[in-house]
Amino acid sequence: MNTTLRIARGEWQHLLRTRLAVTVIVMLLGLIVVAAASSAQQLISEAQTREAYQREAEETFRSQPARHPHRMVHYGHYVFRTPAPLSVIDPGVDPFTGRSIFLEGHRRNTATFAEARETSVLTRLGVVSPAFALQVIAPLLLILLGFTSVVRERERGTMLQLIAQGVPARSLVLGKAAAIGSVAALATLPLLISALWLSMRYPAETLPALIVFAAHAAYLGFWVVLITVVSTLARSARAALITLMIVWAVTTILVPRIAADAAATLVTSQTQTEMDILIQRDMRVVGDSHDINDPGFRSFQDQVLDEYGVDSINELPVNYRGLVSLQGEAEGSAVMNQYASELHATQREQARVINLFSVVSPYIAVRNLSMGTAGTDLINHQRFLDTAEAQRFELIQSINTLHANEVHFADDSARSVDHEAEQRTRVSADFWQRLQGFAFTPRPVGERLASALPLILVMALWLMAAVVLINRVARKAGEV
Amino acid sequence: MKVIQNIRREARFVSANRITRFAWLALALMCLLAISLGQAEISRQTDTIDRALAQSEVELAEVFDAATDYGGAAYSGFSLTYDSPSDAAFLAIGQRDISPWMLRVRALALEGQIHESDNFNPELSLAGRFDYAFVIAFLLPLFIIVLLYDVYASERDAGRVPMLTATAARPQRVWLARVLVLSSGTALACLLPLWLMGSLFGAGAGDLLVISGIVLTNVAFWTALVCAIAFGRWAASVNAAVLTGLWLVLALLVPLAGKLLIDRAVPGIDGAEISLLQRETVNAAWDLPKSATMEPFYASHPEWSHSAPVDVPFHWKWYYAFQQMGDETAEPLSLPYREAIRERDAMTGRVALLSPPVAVLRAIQSVAETDMRSALVYDQTIRDYHAQIRHFFYPLLFEEVAFKRESLEGFPVFNTD
């Protein structure tokens, strides 16, 4: 053990003497600290902005004057997605998804104003976040630090010298790994600090934060081992570097994009526009709920008359127009939800195709594990869309219920031509006070962890493979 | 003659190397794959547009057939706008996997419609696409580094430099020929797939020529950069490490720093404010006297000011007037919003001066018309078309023309030409 530590200390001294290595270490630490700090600052201001917008939207809704209920159905409401706490560490797909949704009657709108559409092509190359720094950049920098570690000793002939001095080959290899590993550990320190800071602010997120930290630590551990192993096996330092560079470029740059294209090609997903046209077609069958004589609501009318035991809609104790609105919204929303859930299923299928590539790219494993656990992945975005839809449906139906109960049918029918009738169809402003507040929370921790489990397994396999590899290589190095 | 001989000898020598041959082959295969995947994506998009266009026409005709007044026809009559991919779009998907390339609009306030996004799978957008532009901008430099970092050091370490230069009249020429062969081989590995597949998939000769120029410039830049390091005194492994570090800085770190700076320099307008303002204006009209809508409307549209006053609680011409006013009120936010996007794009152009990969990406996307500017052009096309729709209905509404189905025949067709 002492020999291993001595070798590690020697390697450290060597690194500190090398200009390139010092530059790399400074770059690595600087990058991660900047990423962690700017990401934390952005989250705080982003969260404040969205909460302010949400409050503003709720206040404007609540302060609406007396109105016809159907006006409020079209007036609608806005909901904003507050960022998940762990997006400080890993913003995941957040820059690519819309941040607000307009909730209104008759329509299930998409989320609007995605950051990537407003900023530049630079957003597509990477996001300034601790996750990106550790997943993509840190491995390359560790390669630059460590590729010569073992092979250098052999090229200079100092390897045999060391072995002759009684240094076990195993200690040599593990010592080198320990030296690179300590740099890697230093690089994860800002992440650990971020994770602990978040755990204090959001105690519920402690476990996910630690898992995200552990995933990144394991990922860098994998690279440390790989670098040492390649450096031990390579014939020359340049062969080691080229091999490692190729592995890095293929697993972190190439495969993720090929995976995305494979997913898009294997699982075709419908566009929103096409879906909207189909929804419009299906809605013709449902009927236009603004028109109580629409053939789509004929059987509904019979059913209502039957239920109340009256002969005409004029005799109903409630406003038939409101009932049609309720019925139309319920049927329409069923149609829209059908399409949306099919779309969500295809997109999750595409995400699963990408996940399969985690078997050839540890980067995909750690990226998807991290954003899934952090609550910033596709599923979480879909959860936002579904939560917003649930709020929309509840809001619209509660207003439609007012329409049925608080507005007289005769006034309602005359409101477009008769000013006084129109005035009577306005219901009290007090009703708008009842609006439920909207607060989006990421998926419950248990659910997130359960779906991250397969990737945790893949990550563990990668790490195990690395450990097995380094043990074999360390043994073999001695035989040479 | 001597030069050609030099080059032929070096070509034989270089292509005898297994690693060089493998690298060229791998690069050519990546280009082929990237172009094929790009073409698959673009043909999916073209098919989708064709399909949606047919469906949309059917739906619009249904709406018009069922209409009983112009206001109602305009209310339910959605029409499809689309941004057909250019002939070279398959070489760079660009913004086409995050910015919508189809949008349905109707005569209501546009600011409530134009910001709708499509439902692109964000996990696909996160990775980005494997297209030709990506291979050229990001992977090609790595190949050049791998092929050239030890072009000098390998001979020096093997002690062959004196022998090589002794037989040559001018020693530099030997190296020049070797570097030339290595880099032109690399360029050809990118260009042959481009010309072959590019013309097969119908890209214009002019576009292919410009993109070839971009590829060659990129190859020349990285060759020069690599040689500047490779012919120094450092060991081969140090060269390789320094070059990898340079690639990292130019390809990833400069863009990241640039993004941080741009976000700070152009904070822009939160799009949510545009929607909120537009919606308040539109909805407030219902609670205001009709004149509060009609007067400002007639002020900006004097051609309709002779129209009869609105004296009922609901009239379609009043309805569309306040939709128009909603857009006009939101314009002071909407214009700077787009201006901020344009400004960020312009600043990205300045970042590109420091990052050749970003410059290459932008250049190819600009030829392929899939860059931010093209997305903004499409945005403007939608706005223009929406104005056409409005001006088709305004005479019918404000002159209070009696409803006839045939009058809807002149409804403007979306046309990008």
Image: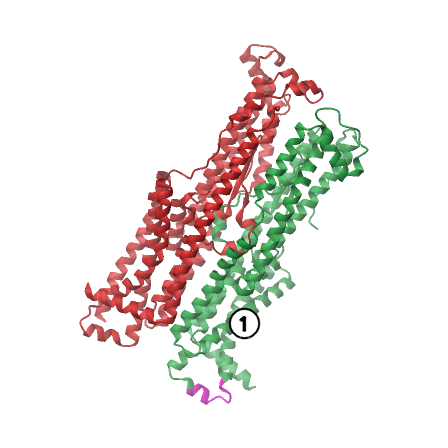
Residue wearing tag 1: B220
The vertical placement of A188 against A243, above or below, is: above
In this rendering, would B86 be left or right of A59?
right
Can you see residue A129? no
Looking at the picture, tell me which residue is in the foreground, A269 or A477.
Answer: A477
Picture colour for chain A = red
The vertical placement of B72 against B205, above or below, is: above
Picture quadrant of residue A199: top left
Q: Position of residue A76 (x, y in %)?
A: 57, 31
The vertical placement of A60 against B148, above or below, is: above
Chain bearing mark 1: B
Amino acid type, mark 1: Ala
**Chain displayed in green:** B
The residue most toward the right is B306
**Magenta stretch, overall SS:** helix
Looking at the picture, tell me which residue is in the foreground, A142 or B61.
Answer: A142
The vertical placement of A99 against A61, above or below, is: below
Name which residue lies at 70% across and 26% down.
Answer: B314
Name which residue lies at 42% across and 70% down.
Answer: B242
Q: Position of residue A344 (x, y in %)?
A: 48, 39
Circle 1: element type: helix
Chain part drawn in magenta: B162-171
In this rendering, would A125 be left or right of A71?
left
Looking at the picture, tell me which residue is in the foreground, B350 or A46.
Answer: A46
Q: Across the whole image, how many numbered discs are drawn on residues?
A: 1
- Crowding at dot 1, Cα within 10 Å, few <14 / some 14-19 / many 20+, comes out as some
Picture quadrant of residue B68: top right
Residue B167 lies in magenta, yes or no?
A: yes
Can you see residue A363? yes
Check the picture and name the quadrant holding the N terminus of chain B: bottom right
Q: Position of residue A466 (x, y in %)?
A: 29, 58
